Amino acid sequence: MTDGGAGYGDLDVLGVLNDPVRRQLYRHVAAAPGDVGRDAAAEAVGVSRSLAAHHLDKLVEAGLLAVDYRRLSGKSGPGAGRPAKVYRRAAGEYAVSVPPRSYDEVSRVLADVVERAGLDRELQTAARGAGEAAQGDPEAALAARGYQPFWDGAVLRLRNCPFRALSEEFPALICGMNLALVEGLAAGAEWSVEVDPCGGGCCVALQRTGEAGDGDKV
């Protein structure tokens, strides 16, 4: 878990999303594969640019979004105009449990035990089995598990790693488990699964192996 903006605790941060427009804007920006400008965000949720700007900046203040400045036209030099304010999902993680729970602590203890015991293969077998037990379309299954899949030409990339904190501490163990889980989710369907990191996202990518052009989505 990380601290939110100045004076914000986890509960305060999540409370910022109580506003329905703000919640829609956060979901849109968080799921986007790149930075999002104010005009695009406003159009996506059907509000005015000024209202979108207000809520986006509140999300930045709370630590849920990060902000940058760049020229959206792609032009540079004199006459290119001022850089626009763009937003992306912040790196922090927030969780609230009432009453308090500490699943992250026990997950670290279990991961440490598995790694020390050299049980990588057993973990991958269990993860693959868990994936195979899921029913339905792999893309929908990945979305339901928080991977935030999006199409990059013919490749289905994963915007979010649900296991990021653990993968940073136990990279080989958790990334191997994650790959096996995704392979299990794609088992029986016409998909290929490989390690192909998405900047800031998951290290696994998928591609359809069926009809040509079937994966060319936006």
Image: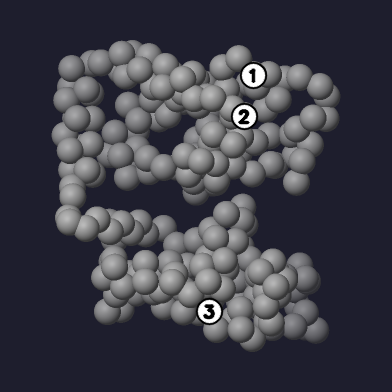
Image x and y of residue 99, in percent: 17, 56
- Label placed on residue 215: none
Disc 2 is placed on an element classified as loop
Graded by Cα atoms within 10 Å as few (under 14), some (14 to 19) or many (20 or more), the crowding at tag 1 reads some
Residue 11 relative to residue 67: left or right: left
Image x and y of residue 74, in percent: 76, 67
Image x and y of residue 30, in percent: 53, 58
Above/below status of 9 relative to 185 = below
* Mark 2 → mark 3, Cα distance in angstroms: 34 Å
Callouts 1 and 2 close, C-beta under 8 Å: yes
Residue 168 relative to residue 48: left or right: left
* Mark 1 → mark 2, Cα distance in angstroms: 8 Å
- Return the disc, 3 or 1, that comes first in the chain's sequence: 3
Which of 52 and 73 lies nearest the eye of the viewer? 52
Residue shown at 57%/66% (left/top)? 24
Q: What residue would you read off at disc 3? A: 55
Indicate the amino acid at tag 2.
Asp
Q: What residue would you read off at disc 1? A: 189
Residue shown at 27%/79% (left/top)? 7
